[in-house]
Image (tube, grey):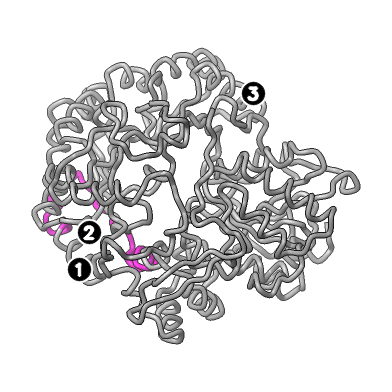
């Protein structure tokens, strides 16, 4: 280890974040590889190492002969200051080599508030921020992840974006890069060839023009770029890579356990949920394969906790059988099996009894809205009776802690819907009093609300976000009606949700705002320790742009979105119909009950795995 780095580590919090050397970290002979990839996560080590996608891509790329993939994370403020003061550039954990020396710098971006951390990492690495300033083929700066379904706010800073799932897409891109490097291509030629790979979006190959009112007039492809970039997906999850042999962190992380991904996609069609649309169609892993992967991952890592991962775990068709298949190993080796992302409408007695065998952590459900009318409008397909029946079973089996998640500011929401949240919480307390098998410990009901953020590729992508003043009024209204003593009410900070709404539906003009805010000190905006909306508002003023134009304005049906070049497989005509059904409070059945014709099944030859 470099002596400068050794001195720095004694002066910062959690130095284990920065030293590498973890069990299962991949080391390769530099002389035996021709392409090096720095897999960068624009957040702290604890967050990045909890990300399953990062673990998957790390394993996939390191499985390629001649390629070495290493990791880099955003340093905490104390470490960033020390690195800058001592001239230590951003480095990769496996080799401690500077990130600027790598062939490809690949960012995994799942959250818009991570954008400033991307600039921090590039600057710490000594890599020019703007794609236009990087004339040579390397380092090639790319980005993937859910946030890249609208990559426009960072279009000036990346060379290309990977849209969709990366297990096949990224190796194809790396293979093309290796060809370009070996044959001496220049960067423009490589980007033109890369744009021909399905799922690759090259922002510089599209010209954007604007109307006088600030809306987009046209997005024009050039140099042979496709008119539309369709997302990539894995067709067969049983053949997809699963990181059985995964890095075991040397310091505690947020999700410090084996994460067993049971399926991708969601059958539900909640109208606010971006993930529910962009990850369609549903593709399941087989039960027997999951049991084998789960056991092998625990054996290799030594973890004593395993969690089943998906957007809606209780929608896995063989969930009880899967749990039974894992039970023998988990019981014999004292491994706790947790099942997050459960739905109240299919929390069956069999599942309740299965969960009762393990540690009784608090249950979490997300009704999202306080009245049936609004739940129908957002297509939650959940009734209060469903919730109470599930809680009755849970309370009678010994549970005494429940978390309930809601959103404020949903389209068509009224004060009656808000007050309905408080009334539902009181009903939950009453349910516990009526059915609890053990009342000695009391009951803990936590109600949490967040501020609705309209996202691309949802039925609500045309909707305005309510104003900050209106959001605060609705929080106050709910607080006044939340009178049950056993209920704790938490609400999400409004500043970050407002900026998230701006960035989520922003165009590439926001790049100048992003850079200006970053230069004013916005570096780790995903953390309240560092986030300051005032910096951003000053940056908007300096750049002559209005954040309300992006967050609080309703879009017209024919307006061209900044992300219109991208296709997630679900078309705008379908999403608009879902919006109209929302205003009529008419539900759409889940995919398992009836195909709604969203179009995503065309990505898998017309057959969704529901």
Residue drawn 78% across the image and 54% down it: 180
Q: Are marks 2 and 3 in contact (CB under 8 Å)?
A: no
* Residue closest to the far right: 31
Q: Horizontally, is 254 left or right of 576 in the view? A: right
N-terminal-most mark, 1 or 2: 2
Q: Which mark is residue 299?
A: 3
Q: Is residue 468 above or below residue 437?
A: below
Q: Which mark is residue 225?
A: none
Q: Secondary structure at mark 2?
A: loop
Q: Secondary structure at mark 1?
A: helix
Q: Are marks 1 and 3 in contact (CB under 8 Å)?
A: no
Residue drawn 59% across the image and 30% down it: 240
- The Cα–Cα distance between marks 2 and 3, rounded to whole angstroms, is 46 Å
Q: Is residue 90 above or below residue 254?
A: below
Q: Which quadrant would residue 384 be assigned to in this image?
A: top left
Circle nearer the viewer, 2 or 3: 2
Q: Is residue 516 visible?
A: yes
Q: Are marks 1 and 2 in contact (CB under 8 Å)?
A: yes
Circle nearer the viewer, 1 or 3: 1
Q: Horizontally, is 370 left or right of 343 in the view? A: left
Q: Which quadrant would residue 504 be assigned to in this image?
A: bottom left
Tell me the magenta residue range.
Answer: 478-500
In the picture, the quarter occupied by the C terminus is top left
- The Cα–Cα distance between marks 1 and 2, rounded to whole angstroms, is 8 Å
Instruction: Decide which of 199, 521 is in the foreground and name it.
Output: 199
Q: Is residue 345 above or below residue 332?
A: below
N-terminal-most mark, 1 or 3: 3
Q: Which mark is residue 470?
A: 1
The question of residue 402 being in magenta is answered with no
The question of residue 499 being in magenta is answered with yes
Instruction: Residue 577: give x, y in percent of width and height.
Output: 23, 48
* Residue closest to the far front: 224
């Amino acid at each position: 280890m470099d002596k400068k780095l050794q001195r720095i580590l004694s002066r910062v919090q959690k130095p284990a974040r920065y030293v590498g050397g973890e069990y299962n970290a991949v080391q390769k002979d530099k002389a035996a590889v021709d392409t090096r990839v720095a897999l960068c996560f624009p957040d702290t080590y604890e967050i990045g190492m909890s990300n399953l996608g990062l673990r998957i891509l790390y394993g996939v790329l390191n499985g390629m002969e001649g390629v070495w993939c290493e990791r880099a994370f955003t340093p905490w403020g104390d470490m960033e200051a020390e690195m800058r003061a001592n001239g230590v550039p951003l480095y990769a954990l496996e080799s401690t080599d500077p990130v600027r020396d790598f062939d490809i710098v690949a960012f995994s971006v799942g959250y818009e508030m991570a954008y400033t951390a991307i600039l921090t990492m590039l600057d710490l690495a000594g890599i020019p921020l703007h794609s236009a300033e990087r004339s040579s083929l390397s380092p090639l700066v790319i980005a993937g992840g859910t946030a890249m379904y609208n990559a426009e706010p960072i279009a000036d800073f990346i060379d290309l974006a990977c849209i969709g799932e990366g297990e096949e897409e990224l190796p194809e891109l790396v293979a093309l890069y290796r060809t370009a490097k070996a044959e001496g291509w220049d960067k423009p030629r490589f980007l033109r060839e890369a744009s021909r790979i399905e799922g690759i979006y090259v922002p510089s190959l599209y010209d954007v023009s604007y109307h006088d009112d600030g809306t987009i007039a046209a997005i024009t492809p050039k140099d042979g770029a496709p008119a539309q970039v369709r997302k990539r997906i894995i067709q067969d999850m049983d053949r997809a890579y699963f990181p059985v042999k995964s890095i075991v962190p040397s310091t505690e992380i947020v999700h410090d356990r084996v994460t067993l991904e049971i399926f991708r996609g969601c059958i539900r069609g909640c109208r606010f949920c971006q993930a529910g649309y962009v990850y369609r169609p549903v593709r399941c892993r087989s039960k027997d394969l999951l049991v084998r992967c789960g056991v092998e991952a625990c054996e290799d890592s030594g973890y004593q906790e395993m969690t089943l991962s998906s957007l809606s775990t209780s929608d896995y068709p063989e969930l009880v059988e899967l749990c039974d298949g894992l039970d023998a190993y988990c019981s014999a080796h004292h491994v706790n099996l947790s099942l997050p992302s459960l739905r109240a409408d299919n929390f069956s007695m069999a599942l309740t009894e299965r969960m009762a065998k393990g540690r009784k952590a608090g249950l979490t459900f997300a009704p999202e809205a306080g009245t049936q009318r609004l739940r129908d409008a957002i297509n939650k397909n959940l009734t209060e009776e469903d919730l109470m029946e599930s809680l009755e079973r849970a309370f009678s089996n010994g549970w005494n802690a429940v978390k309930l998640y809601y959103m404020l500011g949903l389209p068509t929401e009224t004060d009656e819907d808000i007050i309905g949240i408080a009334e539902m919480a009181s009903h939950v307390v009453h349910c516990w009093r009526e059915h609890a098998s053990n009342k000695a410990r009391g009951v803990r009901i936590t109600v949490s609300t967040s501020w609705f953020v309209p996202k691309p590729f949802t039925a609500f992508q045309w909707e305005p976000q309510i104003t900050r003043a209106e959001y605060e009024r609705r929080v106050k209204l709910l607080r006044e009606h939340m009178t049950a003593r056993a209920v704790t009410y938490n609400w999400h900070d409004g500043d970050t949700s407002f900026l998230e709404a701006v960035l989520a539906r922003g165009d590439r003009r926001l790049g100048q705002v992003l850079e200006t805010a970053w230069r004013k000190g916005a570096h780790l905006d995903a953390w309240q320790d560092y986030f300051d909306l005032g910096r951003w508002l000053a940056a908007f003023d300096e750049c002559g742009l209005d954040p309300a134009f992006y967050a609080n304005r309703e879009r017209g049906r024919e307006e061209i979105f900044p992300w219109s070049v991208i296709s997630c497989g679900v078309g705008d005509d379908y999403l608009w119909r879902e919006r109209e059904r929302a205003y009529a409070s008419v539900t759409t059945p889940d995919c398992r009950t009836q195909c709604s014709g969203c179009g995503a099944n065309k990505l898998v030859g017309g057959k969704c795995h529901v």
